[in-house]
Amino acid sequence: DAGVIQSPRHEVTEMGQEVTLRCKPISGHNSLFWYRQTMMRGLELLIYFNNNVPIDDSGMPEDRFSAKMPNASFSTLKIQPSEPRDSAVYFCASRRGTSESYEQYFGPGTRLTVT
Amino acid sequence: AQSVTQPDIHITVSEGASLELRCNYSYGATPYLFWYVQSPGQGLQLLLKYFSGDTLVQGIKGFEAEFKRSQSSFNLRKPSVHWSDAAEYFCAGGSNTGNQFYFGTGTSLTVIP
């Protein structure tokens, strides 16, 4: 199994530009999570999907952030326009079932730098 | 409110010494509890999990954790730490009462020779 795949691994962009982060969950997994990790705020859940449906997006910082999951094998997290305070490592994770008893499998992350 | 708490931000141990990382949970129902490890520049990797049965669970890399309902704790232990164990450790938990899953703030482990 290839694990959770994220692209790009590193992204450097200028303030005001649109950024799109991509995630391919493990095949057969029903839930997908987007997290943001910074030194100041630690690991934050942004949004998660069950069976491609957004369940909880209360962690999305503001309207500049949006996430989609058009099918079971692909999800995007978009920031438009980006700001320097969005600089962080963004992780995608997937889970085999929708129950909280299943563990999450994390991707390697996308390190975003907004200048 | 449901939550997971890691009281120690940073811990330093000598190589070969024993290790215990603390985790406390606050769940009304039976919790599902997990320990993850994050090496520098990497994603989180599952060490072990508990959701029922034997309260002492074994994980990868020689780690174990014990669920203690009376103390609302799920502490991670290792009898002899290796230099490669230096990493960030996260406790996480959920329950069967709803879609609520939380990560602790993490404990950074330094191993000195």
Image: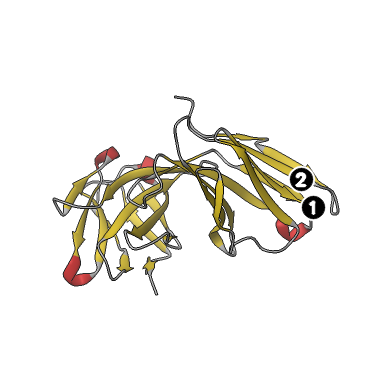
Count neighbours of disc 1 (C-alpha within 10 A) and say few if under 14, some if 14 to 19, many if 20 or more: some
How far from the left and from the top, in percent, is residue A13? 81, 45
Residue located farthest toward the left when viewing the structure as drawn: B54
Closest to the observer, B15 or B21:
B21
Can residue B103 be seen here? The reply is no
Give the amino acid type for the residue marked by disc 2 in the picture.
Answer: Val
Asked if B47 appears above or below B3 in the picture, the reply is: above
Asked if A55 appears above or below B46 in the picture, the reply is: below
Closest to the observer, B24 or B18:
B24
Q: Is residue A24 left or right of residue B70?
A: right
Q: Residue at x 57, y 55 (%)?
A: A47
Give the amino acid type for the residue marked by disc 1 in the picture.
Answer: Gln
Chain of the residue under label 2: A
Which quadrant of the view contains residue A82?
Answer: bottom right
Q: Do the residues labelled 2 and 1 touch (CB within 8 Å)?
A: yes
Q: Disc 1 marks which residue?
A: A80
Q: Which residue is drawn at 32% across and 50% down?
A: A101
How far from the left and from the top, in percent, is residue A1? 44, 24
The Cα atoms of the two marked residues, 2 and 1, are separated by 7 Å
Closest to the observer, B97 or B20:
B97
Chain of the residue under label 1: A
Q: Please say which color scheme the image uses.
A: secondary structure
Residue located farthest toward the top when viewing the structure as drawn: A1
Q: Disc 2 marks which residue?
A: A19
Asked if A23 appears above or below A84 in the picture, the reply is: above
How far from the left and from the top, in percent, is residue B65? 23, 53
Residue located farthest toward the bottom when viewing the structure as drawn: B1
**Which label was assigned to residue B52?**
none
